[in-house]
Image (cartoon, coloured by chain):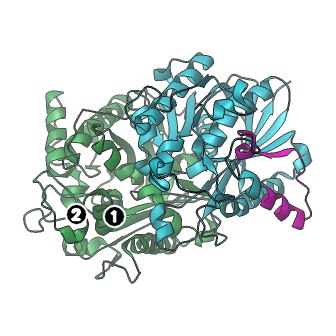
Chain colours: A cyan, B green
Amino acid sequence: MSKRIGKQTLYLPSAPAVEGFAAVVGKKEGEGPLAKRFDFISEDSYFGQASWEKAESHMLRQCFELACDKAKVPPSELDYILAGDLLNQCVSSAFAMRQSAVPYLGLYGACSTMAEGLSLGALLVDGGFAEQICALTGSHFCTAERQYRFPLEYGGQRTPSSQWTVTGAGAVVLGRRGRIRVTHVTHGKIVDAGIKDPNNMGSAMAPAAFDTLRAHFRDTGRSPEDYGAIFTGDLGALGHDILQALFKADGVELGPRTMDCGVLIYDLATQEVNAGGSGCGCSASVLGGHILQAMEDGVWERVLFAATGALMSPTSAQQGESIPGICHALALEREG
Amino acid sequence: MSKRIGKQTLYLPSAPAVEGFAAVVGKKEGEGPLAKRFDFISEDSYFGQASWEKAESHMLRQCFELACDKAKVPPSELDYILAGDLLNQCVSSAFAMRQSAVPYLGLYGACSTMAEGLSLGALLVDGGFAEQICALTGSHFCTAERQYRFPLEYGGQRTPSSQWTVTGAGAVVLGRRGRIRVTHVTHGKIVDAGIKDPNNMGSAMAPAAFDTLRAHFRDTGRSPEDYGAIFTGDLGALGHDILQALFKADGVELGPRTMDCGVLIYDLATQEVNAGGSGCGCSASVLGGHILQAMEDGVWERVLFAATGALMSPTSAQQGESIPGICHALALEREG
């Protein structure tokens, strides 16, 4: 049986279920509007470790263990771990999981990694390749700043379109038992709109979000109104407005049901994050903290989660390249 | 139906088929023992581009197009591209594929990426999620040197255990029609043996190869003799010897049927590569050039392909971390 509907969307007959989820964040995220949703807020940017890179790894491991605990699965009994991050060679995930003794699939989807890992994990379960998997990712403001931008000590200025890398991690255990189900997956194409400003990631990623969401609606025959809520990954305020405008030009009103994880995680008026949050940990911690809990609480029955990523590096930017974007989407549905 | 056999291996009932494959390499690889196997050898390390990073992207794109041509599939009709590389944020793959208009799954498996992408692609086909996919990866000596080690102009000394990053790419199109089939997949766990010398990757990765191959033999009930040939990824001469010794201590003789792509791709006696080749492009170009062609030619009926990766970065090495390894394996079988 083909599970493809339309050109780009998969329907998952067995609807893999969310068995556990968790989110761990840093101090600034713990001062934002979603503070009460997170499982753990670290007051210490080092998470008790000797470097920020080790802190990022520690945070991922902590989040992974919390999600496994909540799913009541011993970590070593998982069939797969799917993980990745923003650090060069994705070391924070690899080091976080090196003692796990579970088959490991390393991913690089930039800030779309949570949607990539969770959707691939859903396919592994639906296809009969796995009984239980964990998808996780995260990011850390301090590791991202020094890798992508400037040493923190430099105190660089930020443009209004810039975003603030979330210190946070999210982890989700998928299996066969649970009320929240993954019913559809739409994997995205790379979309390059020619944006070259690394301080304007939202504009670079919005066309990718548009492309994937439009494909999802086309393939499924659904419209935005069929979802209680639609969450984009980390477009930020500017990218969010561009996405709304792109759909509007296409005759579709996304409306207030469409929200962006990068806008939700901070108070944009007071927390000095300019256009909002970004980083793998942005959509991951909002999913593992806020979205899945709200679905369990009955706030929304059907949610579309569409994380976005910018597939660039400092080297590609220095060599004058534009910033290709990508967006992977998955439909989540709570059973009665 | 569960497709899991044993703890860590998947059996693929539909046995996805190799529909096309290609390999593109640089000048040095084109002077090695496998020269006649490659589809294209570039005399120019820049591949006609303005930077080595752009050259790496160009090489990947060229290899992808060759594999699609040989599979007689228009690139845009693929259901998925699975790709990754060694560059920070995997930019060479993303930029190579940004015009492809095909759903894109970015991977980070270091030098195991070919096995990771091909095996995941096989699951997508077997699970009914895709009809045709392309898995590809590559590496470039000059981009790797300046990112991981020293500017080329510096002329750094190399230790005898060091390996030479292959300038090369490999691409494989999988679908439903073809004589060479993917029958089993064994995804590896991260194995960290505590090796800390980034000039001794073979020693760091050999324990991971041992772990995955042993799991494969245990789960399938097969022994090395059940394969015409077993190819490890890029252990190099030193790592290859360690792998043989680990199995010997376990009472298993791998014997001469077990070869390493990093040893095969260069003439170790004359090409000054110390312990042999490495990089994502090493096992990828040996698979896409040599192994699959030899299988088509009837040299081996059944092959085990086990690419290895070292999940480290310059930052992790600088922070005193050891080098975790990983190895993913897949069984290939030619039909009568």
* Highlighted range, magenta: A241-269
| Image point (70%, 28%), residue name | A35
**In the image, residue B90 lies in the stretch drawn in magenta:** no
The location of residue B63, given as percent across then percent down, is 43, 71
Q: Which mark is residue B328?
A: none
Q: Tell which subunit mark 1 falls on.
A: B
Label 1 residue SS:
helix
Q: Which residue is mark 1?
A: B285
Tell me which amino acid carries mark 2: Ile
Which sits in the foreground, B161 or A194?
A194
Which sits in the foreground, B309 or A44?
A44
Tag 2–tag 1 contact (CB < 8 Å): yes
Q: Is residue A48 above or below residue A224?
A: above
Q: Is residue B196 above or below residue A310?
A: above
* Image quarter of residue A25: top right
Q: Is residue A155 left or right of residue A277?
A: left
| Image point (64%, 44%), residue name | A115
**In the image, residue A255 lies in the stretch drawn in magenta:** yes
The location of residue A309, given as percent across then percent down, is 61, 54
